[in-house]
Image (spheres, rainbow, N blue to C red):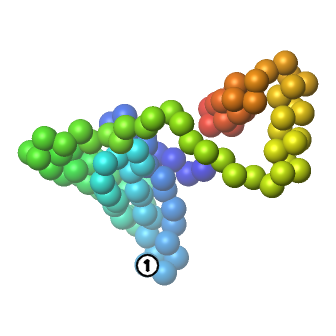
Amino acid sequence: MNMMEIDGYKAIIAYDPEIEMFRGEFVGLNGGADFYAKDIDSLKQEGKTSLKVFLDMCAEDGIEPGKEYSGKFNVRMPSNLHAEVVGAATAAGKSLNQWVIDTLDRIVHA
């Protein structure tokens, strides 16, 4: 995953070959804040500028910049995968919920 952290906020970075520029998009915000540049140093600077504009607008409007997450989500999967996941959780001596949390945590922080 191509991630960049700017002032404590994470952005996903991708290269857009059509415009021959890098594109950054902040994640976890209550609105859109994206930025473009031809090179990484410029991308960081554009990201700082975009983030500042977004945060200033939130402050002016009295809006919390970060999204609130409930900590709950539903996952739909094929029944055979569901059975295998339950088996893996049981073999690890964990509840399905704890096994999923541990697995996601390990992948995200790898």
Residue 79 locus on image (x, y percent): 84, 51
Would you place residue 21 above or below residue 52 in this image? below
Q: Quadrant of the C terminus?
A: top right
Any part of residue 110 in sight:
no
Query: In which quarter of the view is residue 36 placed?
Result: bottom left
Residue 28 locus on image (x, y percent): 40, 44
Q: Secondary structure at mark 1?
A: loop
User: Could you tell me the amino acid type at mark 1?
Assistant: Ile
Of all residues, the one furthest to the bottom in this rendering is 18
In the image, taking residue 86 as reference, residue 58 lies left or right, namely left
Any part of residue 84 in sight:
yes
Q: Residues within 10 Å of mark 1 (few under 14, many from 20)?
A: few
Residue 51 locus on image (x, y percent): 27, 48
Query: In which quarter of the view is residue 38 placed?
Result: bottom left
Residue 8 locus on image (x, y percent): 37, 34
In the image, taking residue 41 as reference, residue 73 lies left or right, namely right
Q: Give the residue pinned by disc 1.
A: 19
